[in-house]
Image: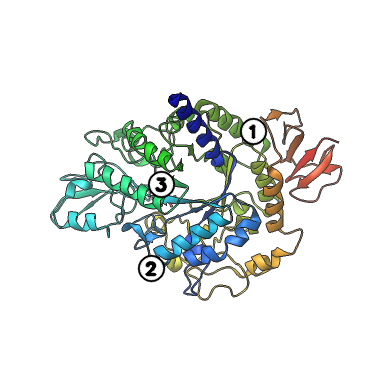
Amino acid sequence: MQWLQGILLRVTNEVANDWWRDAVVYQVYPRSFADGNGDGTGDLIGVYDKLEYLSALGVDAIWLSPFYTSPLADGGYDVADYCDVDPRFGTLADFDLLIGRAHELNIRVIVDIVPNHSSSEHPWFREALAGIGRDRYIFRDQPNDWESIFGGPAWTQVPDGQWYLHLFDPSQPDFNWSHPDVHAFFKDVLRFWLQRGVDGFRIDVAHGMIKADGLPDVGALGHRQIELMTTAELPYFDQDGVHEIYREWRPILDEYGAMAVAEAWVSSPARLARYIGRDELHQAFNFDFMVAEFDAKSFRVVIEKSLAEAELVGAPTTWVLSNHDKPRHVTRYGGLARARAATLLMLSLPGSAYLYNGEELGLDEVTDLPPELREDPAFLRTGESRDGCRVPIPWAEGAWTNPWLPMPARWDAITADKQEHDPGSTLNFYRQAIRLRRGFRGDIQWLDVADGVLSFRRGDRRVVLNTSQSPVPIEGTVLMASGPVTDTLPPDTAVWLADR
Ligand code: NOJ
């Protein structure tokens, strides 16, 4: 009987721990979210102070982008100490306070883990430069033809003549995952944060840690390797060996009932499916939705593909429209009306939705930051920059003293405090959508509609999105809409309907 009890316990735990399946997860970019100590850089106390706001927004979890000790050469995705908080972001005691209060408010906490590379300021890399333990990183006498995702060669030479690999910035040396120390180290890092109560991890470059044996040249792909990153097979991404790492990690996650979501860019849904499952990770980001055009047909293709992917892995998919790496969707789609319509579509889909801080205020991309203020290492190497989506959140006029990136004057009209009591504000639109989203049940059944219109039923609700140029008639009780509607749905608008 004990075996039966064991199975029952496991099944019960799995159901109880499956909160992530349909969760709304809010990404906090700590540097830009809220400034608790008034020094112009966001911090953990700032996040703590906003937990009531996040609870009122209705999110199930927050995902904190890295807040660990770091030179911030890549906004913290260059970690110098994986088990401490950078003084600019606060202290471990602040983290404990934050997670304690979040849990009281029923908000789960996911933290980022960056296992592909460390900062060049990490003690191991400093030792490596001094000639000690170099094999924890990837040093060679000669570079190969691999390119950095941020532009230029993926190799940098050190004074004694050897070269080290960095798939990102030279300040982000890649770990050598063939070394047992690296395996042991990251298992300890997971435990460190699990013991502090985290509910999950977002795994950075989850497809990157293992490199093909012998580090073969990519050859013919030459300078197109980054452009083809998500379609071609590359010797530094999506190697079979990464799955062994996740199989090592999963029992640790299970021990604490924690989840993990992979940031994995791979060449096909079938390849992505390999990251998910009972002995690997729980979810993977689905970036196809984020890169789809604002067009009924493109959305439908992506949704169908994503749902098929979900079937392959037996886990619901994730949806995301904005994050700290891509221009905000208000700007990508050419306006707030479309952004709100796409958001309403996203929040009606089965699976979990990841929101990016500030999208609930309808923030747009800041495209005119002066070059001297831009900090993204990709900008310094390629001229393309992700700083425009990382501008601090406008809580109220003057809420930030000397913010690390300046906020545009146009945001004075859409600060969180101005939106708070305005029933038509984007903030209240997000609050209402997150609350009402819980009422969606069951699978999607597509409905036949005109070109440029997307419509489906889930249970007793229908969703209609109009991406065409003309209004379309709608029938039923309007639960909510992304903009004004009558008995017709204007262009660039979405609606949730209940049957009459
Ligand atoms: C993906 C992160 O989202 C991005 O911000 C970072 O630059 C790279 N990984 C490297 O860690």
- Circle 2 residues within 10 Å: few <14, some 14–19, many ≥20: few
- Horizontal arrangement in the rendering, residue 6 relative to residue 305 (left or right): left
Residue indicated by mark 2: 87
Closer to the camera in the image, 227 or 23: 23
The spot of residue 376 in percent (x, y) is 42, 59
The answer to whether residue 242 is seen in the rendering is yes
Residue at 39 percent across and 51 percent down: it is 195
User: In the rendered view, does 154 fall on the left or right side of 199?
Assistant: left
Task: Label 3: state its secondary structure.
Answer: loop
The number of numbered discs placed on residues in the rendered structure image is 3
Q: Which residue is mark 1?
A: 300
For the point 67% across and 68% down, the residue is 417
> Dot 2: what SS?
loop
Mark 1 or 2, which is nearer the eye? 2
Q: Position of residue 481 (x, y in %)?
A: 76, 47
Q: Nearer the viewer, residue 52 or 320?
A: 52
Above/below status of 400 relative to 228: below
| In the depicted structure, whether residue 457 falls above or below residue 20 | above
**Residue at 44%, 39% in the rendered image:** 265
Q: Which of pointers 3 and 1 indicates the residue nearer the eye? A: 3
Say if disc 3 is inside 8 Å of ligand 1. Answer: yes
Amino acid type, residue under disc 1 in the picture: Arg
N-terminal of the two: label 2 or label 3?
A: 2
Q: Sequence order check: which comes first, mark 1 or mark 2?
A: 2
The CA span between labels 3 and 1 is 28 Å
Separation (CA) of disc 1 from disc 2 = 45 Å
